Image: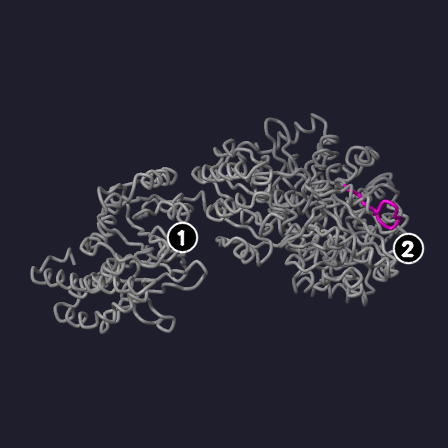
Amino acid sequence: MPLHEQATAAQDDRPSPRLLREIAGLRAQNLRSRAPVVDPSGDAVVTMTTHGERIRLVWVALESIARGDILPRRLILFLDEPDLARPLPSPLLRLQRRGLEILPAAPGLRVHAKYWPYVSAILRHELPLVVSDDDMVYPARWLRVLVEAHRARPELVHAFRAHEIPCLDGALRPYREWRPASGTAPSFAHFGTGVSGQLLPVALLERLRDEGEGFLESAPTADDVWINAVAVRNGIQTAQVEAQSRNFPFVPATQATGLYRSNVAGGQNDVQLERTLAPEERERICAGSRPAAVRSRAAPTFVTWGRFTDNPWQDIIETGVRSAGISTIDLEHGASLESVLDRAADGLAVHLNWTAPITQRASTEEDACAAVDRALAEVDALQRAGGALIWTVHNAAAHEPINPCAERRLLEGLAERADIVHTMHPRTAEAIEEAWGIRLERQVNIPHPSYLGVYPDEMDRSSARSALGIPESRTAVLLHGTLREYKGLDALADGFLAARERGADLHLLVAGRPGAGFDAAAFEQRFADRDDVTVHADHVPVDEVQLWHRAADVLVMPYREGLNSGALQLAATFDLPVVAFPCMAVEQAQDEGWAVVVDPARREWLLDGLAALPSAARRRASEAARTRAPEATAEAFARIVLDAIATRSRPIDPTAVAVIVSFGSAALIERGLTPLLSRMRSVIVENPTDTAEHERLMAVADRLRGDLIEMPQNVGFGAAVRAGVQRALEMGARHVLLLNPDVRADAPTIERMLERSLAEPDAMVAPRILTPDGRLWFDGGVIDWDRGIARHRRRDEADRALDWLTGACLLVPVHAWDRLGGLDDDYFLYWEDVDFTHRWLAHGRLVLEPGAHVVHEVGGTQGSGGKSLGYTYYNARNRMLFAARHLGLRGLLRWSRSAPAYHDELLARSGAPDAAARARHRATAARGSRNGALRGVERLVRKRPESND
């Protein structure tokens, strides 16, 4: 089934309490009911097939049909001969006594066993056939709705779920691009699926019988492909019985096997469609299809930047993305993104899954750094075009780093740029910061999935062991995956030999291609004369993965490191418990009871681990795999792709213009504000420093398509903001967003602030401000009028009225700016936002939007090394200026008396390293207070007009 189907199924496969109650009711029905499951006057026949382990749960689907509003005339379960030869589960025997027919199916029919034995056995069909799946809990209305639709239009195929087949230039699009059909109109371009049940009319049953067993050659694993092809061939259309496709709940614990990987992700449905459909049938389908070109032109695009062939993890997420209506493109490692940038207008997300090829394919550190620069330049071009970068972080560092300096440079660059950082372990950010000192922002954690239904799983333990020559009595331990030094193969060899020396009946299996630097020949030579070791130092084909895992009893992971492990999830997929060395990757498996962590210092670690495995470990591994089904991961990943595209591609209200003042801050703006400013209009005002900085800032402004104003000299913050706002007004701004360069803000935060401002037009709006480590830094400002201190509101003051808001991130309606005349140039630097926002209280409100958060690298514009003398001077000076303006002469005198205490506070903030530096700061503070008081008195004496307020 296409992945839109898989994604919905994933939700259903996580049993809800309601579903569990429903199944409990069906169990009670099975135990107690004597009511027949068929009606001799019924209007349809229902058939089903199952196999292997699924036989024990097929009764759930059958009982759900038996509780229906109407009953079928016949209810038939087809089993192959080996399954019929085994004792049937008691629930099936009870259903058989109530009228269920359990009949043999010929060998080799596979999925076609659900309908072909019945179709081929009836010489003249009189009743429609409803084909059903063995893993569904059908609603009571299920058969009634299908039969009623058949009565109204007996010539059609009727299905609860159908796909619409898209065509482009007369050719069918790949199966993975098919979307759910909508509406109930019949069409040759509607492809019915049996998963939720479909009714085949008598005319189609006759044609299917006449076609014979051609499906064995053209569509051996795709019954829906064959049935739909025969229908189209004979002029029979398909219609959904309801306007929307229906997904019924899966029976829990039935999704461990399936044809998803080969048919959908592996493209086998397309192969079988190609073999089955004749040209005239394709023409008939496309005549009824809406043109794919019309729909796909506006579809967003997902680019896998660095595609490994035959990689199941990438298959899973790509198919999930397609299910969300997003087209996909694969690019090789190191390929330029230029070829896809024109798709950004319709939405573009690029996924960087593995970074190692960028740095590790270079022969020298210099070449690696050049490769990093090229990769980051590609990301910059992507984001300039409006595309989003999604970066998946698998581990804290490359397992065997070759160019660590280049790797650091790459990780830092990606951490700054990524629109979404996808992690699979909840402690990834902690591990990255510990290893590199790099903080990850914009994280989304989606755990590594299992591979249920992805790999073929048709082999049992006995046949796998026979193929590998392993005695049934031996406990087989497996290491699977690329063979690398960090995986501890030497420790594995020692642990295995120690166990054998102590009489343990073990067999060692090692399967995987050698990684760079691993001496596979030496490892194989170590066991050359042993019959209890099997080493396959080569790629393991997809269809042979089951061979190694079904032959094994335990997976071993003597890894030295790792946050995540595909091998671990593959073990769960095949119900294998795990013995491992301590690493983050196995922590959850250990908590869930299917992994044991051992002491790597002990040579007998393997014996220790095998002895410690709980008896229920295999069952718990199976349960863990079901809770991390790949369909759920696919759906979750598709959501973050859509979020990333939406965040990048949807512009913020163009009447809101950001104004940023830069004083040597080009790097800060580029690092922290690029994601936001790429989506809104902006004005950057430069208080100049040097030519190199000016060139950097011009490049940043060009990249962001923002306006750049170069002031002739450093005119101070207030005057620079005034120049920026004037330009914003010329651009038609109705809201001005004041931003510090050292703030990191995202678009949803600013949009929430805009919504609040539109709802309260008389308000200036600010967000809550956090430090980079997540602590609350600003939750509104208050003034201690007695001591002359403007400070941040404390946690216990949440109900206290605001006296001021910081200009680090402040949304100002233009009418408020005009009313106040903007910032007061006289402040030059510091306290101007306190003055500006406090003045607004005479005309409107100050609002802190609790749903909006930004991150402030406090003091980032000043760099490291403590506060400057300018910081001390202007804080002391402007405090006195504020007092004169708002409190008059008496207030100015009162604040003058408390100035020494304020100087002490400034000294404490300064971080002055020695007595001489502290003396300079203290003298500077005194000079600032004196000059501020004089300037304040001058203004009072001159009674300078106070703007417009």
Q: Is residue 898 left or right of residue 536?
A: left
Q: Residue furthest right?
A: 85
Q: Which type of secondary structure does the marked residue at label 2 adopt?
A: loop
Q: Can you tell which of label 1 and label 2 is closer to the viewer?
A: 1
Question: Does residue 533 belong to the magenta stretch?
Answer: yes
Residue at 38% in and 61% down: 768
Callout 1 environment at 10 Å: few (<14), some (14 to 19), or many (20+)? many
Which of disc 2 and disc 1 is earlier in sequence?
A: 2
Q: Please tell me whether the stretch drawn in magenta is mainly helix, strand or loop.
A: loop
Q: Is residue 703 left or right of residue 641?
A: left
Q: Which mark is residue 744?
A: 1
Q: Which mark is residue 947?
A: none
Task: Give the vertical position of 787 relative to 236 (above or below).
Answer: below
Q: Position of residue 869 (x, y in %)?
A: 26, 58
Q: Which residue is mark 2?
A: 86
Which range is magenta?
527-537
- Displayed quadrant of residue 807: bottom left
Q: Position of residue 205 (x, y in %)?
A: 79, 39
Question: Does residue 721 belong to the magenta stretch?
Answer: no
Residue 656 vs residue 220, the one in the foreground: 656
| Coloring basis for residues | one colour
Q: Position of residue 155 (x, y in %)?
A: 71, 38
Q: Residue furthest left?
A: 942
- Does residue 406 appear in this view? yes
Residue at 45% in and 37% down: 381
Q: Which type of secondary structure does the marked residue at label 1 adopt?
A: strand
Q: Is residue 60 left or right of residue 243?
A: right
Residue at 30% in and 39% down: 691
Task: Give the vertical position of 320 relative to 282 (above or below).
Answer: below
Give the CA distance from mark 1 to mark 2: 65 Å
